[in-house]
Structures are given as C-alpha cells and as structure tokens.
Image (cartoon, grey):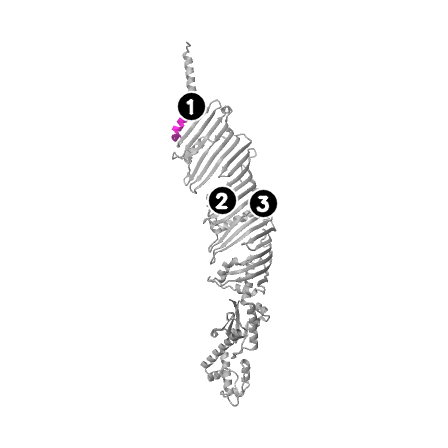
C-alpha cells in the first residue's frame, strides 16, 4: 500500500479543489448571475450556457435573454457570444482581444415621451462625471481588437409617440481589426430592412490622413416606415415606394462639412396620399445621377434626372389648394429671413443639372370653386430640359402632352436663369375639346359648351426691354347649350363675341398680336396676354356692328341707329333699307336678337306736334295752303308764311319760346302728350309690322321698345331707334 506524505496530500488536495473549482466555475458564475441579475443590473436575466476556455482565455455564452423592467418582455437576446482575449500582450502594456463573435443578436429598442427602454441600464450622469474626474483619459492607451463578426442579428426600433416600427433584420458586420496604431481600418455591414430591402455598407478609414470612404448600397428598401417622421413636415396619410441607392461618400474625420458624394439614387413605385386619403404624388420611377456633390464647398453637380410616369394631383379649393394643405406645417416661416438666406447661399453655391427627362407624366387638376367640380387630365406628358446652371443664358426645353383624351400640345422654349425676361416659345395646341370646360361657362355665363374644338399657335419672343407675342386662334364647330339655373357670377359678353366671330363654315379664326415692355413695373406676361384676349372679346361684343356690317355688306354705322323725323310715324325708304340689312344678318346669324329702342327729344317733339296741329287748323281756312312737311322742313315753311304766323298769333314771329307757348296753349298740354304717345307708339308699330310681315322675321329675333324719355341725357335726345344686338 502506497502511503503519501502529508505535504503531497495537501498539494493534491489543493489541485483537486482548483480543478473542481475551475471545472464548475462557469456553472457557478452562470447560476450566480442569473439568481442575482436584478440586484446586479436591475433586470431579469437568463443564460442557457456559459463556458470558460482557460487554454485560449476565452468565454462562450449561449442563448442569453435580458428582459425589460417588467420581467416578461424581452429586451436583448442572442444565440451565441464568443470572446477570445490575448492576455499575454498585457506584458507589453496593450489590451488585446483576438476575436469577438456574436450570432443571432435580437434587440428591441422602445422610445416614448420619457426616454428609451434602456435608460435604467445607463449609469447616472453624476457617476459618469465623477469617474471622468477621477480617471482622466489616457491618450497613450494601447488596444487592439481583431476579427469582430456579428451575424444574423435583428434590431427593432419602436417609437411609441409616433406608433412606428423600424425593423432591421439579418444584420451582418465584419471588422477585421481596430487598433490604436492601425493606419487603416475596414468594415463591412449588411442588413435587411423590411420584407425585401437590403442595405450594405463598406467603410475604409485612413487614420493617418484622417479621412474615410463609405460605399453605401440600398436595394428595394420600403420607405413606408419613414412616414411617421415625414408627418412632422407634411399632412399625409400614406407613403409607399422602394428606394435604391449606390453612393460613395468620401469625407474628413476632422471637418464634417468636408464631404464628397457621388453615385445615384432612385425611387420606384412611389405613391403619396394626402390626409384625406386622396392621391397627391406618385411616380413609376425617379432617378437622380449624382455626378459630384461637395457639401462644404456648396458644389452640386447632378448628371441626369429622370422621371418615369410621374403623377401630380392638384386641387383648387375656395380658400387654398391641396398643396398648401399638405405642406402647411412647413409653410409658416419668416419670409424675410428666408429671402436673406437664399441671397447669401445663391452667391456662394454652384449647381448644375445636365439633363432632365420626364416620360409619360400625368397631371390631374380639379377646381372646386365652381358650381360643379371641374376635373381635367393632362396625360402622356413628355419634357426634356437641357443643362441647367446658375450661369445658363439659354436652357432649351422640348415638351408634348395629350389633353383630357382629346387634343395635344407640342412645342419648344428657351429660358435664362440669369434674366427671366430672356424667353422664347413656339407652341402648338391642336384639337382641344372645349366641352370639358363647361363647368366654367356654366359658372360665369350660365350656359354649357355643347361642342367645339380649339387650335392655337403661340409664339413669344421676349427680351429685357421688349415683348412680341403672336397668337393664332381657330375655334371650330363651337356652340353653347341652353341656359342653366346657375347663378351668374359675372355678366360676360364672351358668348356674343364668339358667335359674332363665326364665319360661314361655323369657324372662328383670328390673330391676336401682343406687345409690351418687361421693364414696366406691373409687367406680367400671362396677365398681358390674357387681358389682351379678353379685351378683344369684350370690344367685339360691346361694338359688334363692325362685324355685322361686313356680314350685311354695308356701312356699320348705318345699322347702329335708325334716325327718324320728328312728329312722323311712317318708315321711309332709307329706314326700310337699314332693316333689310338687319334681316340679312339675322338670316346668317339666326341666334342674334336685335333690340330697337326708340329715343326722342320729347320737348322738341311736342313743340313740332303743336306747330303741325296749328298748320292743319290753318289749312282749314279759305286762305289755307296745305303742306305735308315734317321736322326742320316744316319749321322753315312756317317761318316763311306770315299768314300762318299771324294765324291766331297776331304778329309775325320766329319759332321762339313765346311762339311755342302760344301753340301749346292753343292745343293744350294734355292733348299734346296724348298725340306724342300716339306718334311714339305708331313708330314702334310700324317697325314691328315691317319686320314681321314684310321681312318675315320671327319675333324671337327682335324687340321694339321705348326708352325712359324722362331720364334721357342731352346726348340721347334725338328722334331715332337705337339698335342693340345680343344672343338668344
């Protein structure tokens, strides 16, 4: 039997104890940490496995779960963590880790109005300050970490205030080395964002030159999770789209503004809905080629900008537009400050866009300010812009589009960003269906457009001191419908003007030249063209007899008024000729209505009626000389007849006030008024009968009436029919 010495027994016992201790140390530590985790860190913790490798000086932890403060919801978990330390480098004063491997990390970050769900794990600010004060940073600390690898990890960030979840999945990170004396570092990260999105980041850091380069690749990332943050700036309810990006970022580690960016970015299947759920903006794809951007130098050079099937939905309300409603959160700004800032930046900034292409665009405009909604679609919009820079003197633009399913616009233009008054345009609009604009005509003149097409050629040549604009307009087969019940907002003569302008082929063709001086303070191109067009229509409707005269082949002034002889009822030959010209006009323009308003100087007319009556009484005497004169001819005859002037007057007098008063006294005021009314009614009757019976004109095409003789101005006091024209 072998007998051990007491000394050997003690040594063996110690070794045995140490062996057992080290063998079971991981289990002891694991159970201790789990049991006392709430005392140690204030959270419940569970670890499935904990192993120490004494040979490699490494630790491996499997299936760790750290819970929230409530003890039931999971905060952090991972499948495996392996850390291998290199303690031998401590001999040279360097802290070194040869490997860090983390697999299956799952982190749930929650933020609310009070902070984050990990705030309780962080040391108090006082303790951090104290530790910094006690242990100042040692700038000569040597460290190195090799082979950092994170695989198959997920990070979920939930913002309770915005009720928004941002979920990063399949995060993988590789970092070969981080060391105090390393001249260059490399890092690669990739992760999934959403159901289809992937993000890849490759970073190279040059410590010696204090610069970094990051290659960022984003593929099919769903932008909808960012909606919650965009709502701070826009009133929208939904946002969808897939973002793709390939960028190279080269920057300085000491100057954050020294950043150079190039690459491209695109957005596919983009759709934005306003707060009411209506479509606002959309695009099949949007691509921007970033040629070179330098943030610090304010240098922005963009290659190609491409928009495929962009959609814009614009709505005009009585008080604002849908754009104002959507961007209302960012529209409350100090305009003075904004203008000041823009001036400073513009002086320092360089920008350039090589090419801008829009294909298959769509614009829908809705006007809700009328009695019924006006909805208009502009489809297949194609726009091509040449190079745009702040110094560009002439930027070419070519465009084409289809209008509401009928009609198209094509043209080209040139504009300058140095001087907005250097502008040229050649545009052709053809086959525009005018019926679509019925909501406007119903609102303004209470009649719908039932048919008609518009062809319009426009050319503009504008220089800083001169404008020349040519407008060639042709309206074919144009017609209004019956009067609606819409309350007229304005009494516009547009309908009459357009009807008068129609030729024998039912077309309206006219040229409208416009000129102006951009140097004038109130110069606005669109306003000048529109005002000239409206003035043309108003003048045509207000003074239609120029056109009517050409239709009848007569002097326009001959049909504006029909002069009558005082105290005479019957129509003369010249009067009938004028009415015959009007009959020809009605035959060619059956929608016209002529109004004949009789005017006269009732005082002078009664004077002449009194003279005429006295003449007839004089003719009944034996010495009588019968006459059938009227007006001025009758006065001249009376003044040359002493026997008539002395008839019941006692002496020869001129046709003066005393003479008139004598005649009035002979006839009597009441009888003179009745005789005047009879003559006026007789004239109206004669004109009506001739128009209806002799010329066979429908009563729907003319009206005969008498003016308010008591309130006529002196300029109107003549015996005549004033002629006006309107449309049924």
Give the camera-side residue of 41 and 224: 224
Q: Considering the numbered disc 3 on the image, is that residue within a helix, a strand or a loop?
A: strand
Res. 25 mark: 1
- Disc 2 residue crowd, few under 14, some 14–19, many 20+, Cα 10 Å: some
Q: Which of marks 1 and 2 is nearer the N terminus?
A: 1
The residue where tag 3 is placed is 304
For the residues marked 1 and 3, what is the alpha-carbon distance in whole angstroms? 65 Å
Q: Nearer the viewer, residue 309 or 656?
A: 309
Work out whether residue 668 or residue 352 is closer to the camera in this orientation and state it: 668
At x 41%, y 26%, the residue is 30
694 drawn magenta: no
Give the image quarter of residue 131: top left
Discs 2/3, front: 2
Q: What's the CA distance linking mark 1 and mark 2?
A: 54 Å
The residue under label 2 is 240
Q: Regarding mark 1 in the picture, which secondary structure is present there?
A: helix
Which is in the foreground here, disc 1 or disc 2? 2
111 is higher (above) or lower (below) than 410? above
Residues shaded magenta: 27-40
Taken as a whole, is the magenta stretch helix, strand or loop?
helix
Nearer the N terminus, badge 1 or badge 3? 1
């Amino acid at each position: 039997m072998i007998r051990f010495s007491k000394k050997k027994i003690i040594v063996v016992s110690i070794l045995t104890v140490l062996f057992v201790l080290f063998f079971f140390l991981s289990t002891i530590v694991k159970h201790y940490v789990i049991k006392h985790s709430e005392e140690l860190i204030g959270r419940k913790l569970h670890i499935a496995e904990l192993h120490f490798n004494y040979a490699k000086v490494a630790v491996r932890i499997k299936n760790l779960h750290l819970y929230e403060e409530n003890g039931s919801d999971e905060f952090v978990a991972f499948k495996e963590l392996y850390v291998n330390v290199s303690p031998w480098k401590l001999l040279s004063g360097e802290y070194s880790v040869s490997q860090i491997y983390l697999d299956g990390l799952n982190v749930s970050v929650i933020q609310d109005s009070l902070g984050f769900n990990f705030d309780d794990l962080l040391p108090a600010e006082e303790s951090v300050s104290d530790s910094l004060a006690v242990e100042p940073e040692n700038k000569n600390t040597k460290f190195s970490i090799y082979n950092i690898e994170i695989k198959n990890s997920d990070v979920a960030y939930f913002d309770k205030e915005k009720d928004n979840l941002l979920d990063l999945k399949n995060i993988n990170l590789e970092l070969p080395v981080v060391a105090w004396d390393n001249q260059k570092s490399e890092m690669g990260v990739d992760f999934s964002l959403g159901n289809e999105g992937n993000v890849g980041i490759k970073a190279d850091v040059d410590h010696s030159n204090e610069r970094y380069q990051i290659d960022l690749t984003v593929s099919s990332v769903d932008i909808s999770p960012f909606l919650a943050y965009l709502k701070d700036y826009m009133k929208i309810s939904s946002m969808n789209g897939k973002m793709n990006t390939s960028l190279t970022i080269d920057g300085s580690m000491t100057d954050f503004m020294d950043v150079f960016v190039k690459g491209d970015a695109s957005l596919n299947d983009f759709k934005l809905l306003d707060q009411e759920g209506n479509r606002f903006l959309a695009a099949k794809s949007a691509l921007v080629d970033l040629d070179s951007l330098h943030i610090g130098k304010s240098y922005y050079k963009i290659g190609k900008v491409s928009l495929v099937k962009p959609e814009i939905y614009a709505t005009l309300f009585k008080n604002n537009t849908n754009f104002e409603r959507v961007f209302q959160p960012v529209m409350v700004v100090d305009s003075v400050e904004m203008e000041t800032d823009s001036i400073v930046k513009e002086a320092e900034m360089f920008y350039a866009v090589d090419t801008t292409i829009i294909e298959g665009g769509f614009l829908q405009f809705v006007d809700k300010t009328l009695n019924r909604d006006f909805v208009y679609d502009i489809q297949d919009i194609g726009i091509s812009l040449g190079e745009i820079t702040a110094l560009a003197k002439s930027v070419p633009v070519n465009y084409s589009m289809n209008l509401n399913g009928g009609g198209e616009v094509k043209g080209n233009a040139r504009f300058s960003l140095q001087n907005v008054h250097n502008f040229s345009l050649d545009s052709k609009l053809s086959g525009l269906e005018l019926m679509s604009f019925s909501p406007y005509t119903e609102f303004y003149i209470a009649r719908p457009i039932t048919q008609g097409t518009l062809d319009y050629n426009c050319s503009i040549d504008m220089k800083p001191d001169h404008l020349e604009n040519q407008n060639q307009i042709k309206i074919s087969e144009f017609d209004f419908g019956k009067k609606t019940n819409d309350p007229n907002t304005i009494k516009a003569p547009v309908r009459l003007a357009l009807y008068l302008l129609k030729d024998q082929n039912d077309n309206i063709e006219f040229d409208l030249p416009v000129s102006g001086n951009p140097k004038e303070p109130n110069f606005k191109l669109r306003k000048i063209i529109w005002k000239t067009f409206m003035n043309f229509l108003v003048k045509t409707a207000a003074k239609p007899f120029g056109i009517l005269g050409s239709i009848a082949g007569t002097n326009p002034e001959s049909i504006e008024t029909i002069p009558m002889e005082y105290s005479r009822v019957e129509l003369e030959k010249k009067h009938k000729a004028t009415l015959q010209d009007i009959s020809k006009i009605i035959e060619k323009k059956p929608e016209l209505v002529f109004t004949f308003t009789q005017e006269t100087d009732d005082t002078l007319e009664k004077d002449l009626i009194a003279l005429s009556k006295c003449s007839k009484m004089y003719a009944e005497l034996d010495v009588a000389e019968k006459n059938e004169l009227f007006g001025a001819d009758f006065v001249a005859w009376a003044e040359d007849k002493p026997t008539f002037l002395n008839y019941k007057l006692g002496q020869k007098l001129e046709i003066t006030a005393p003479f008139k008063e004598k005649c009035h006294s002979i006839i009597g005021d009441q009888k003179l008024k009745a005789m005047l009314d009879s003559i006026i009614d007789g004239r109206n009757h004669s004109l009506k009968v001739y128009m209806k019976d002799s010329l066979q004109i429908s009563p729907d095409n003319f009206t005969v009436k008498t003016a308010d003789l008591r309130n006529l101005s002196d300029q109107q006091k003549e015996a005549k029919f004033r002629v006006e024209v309107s449309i049924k």
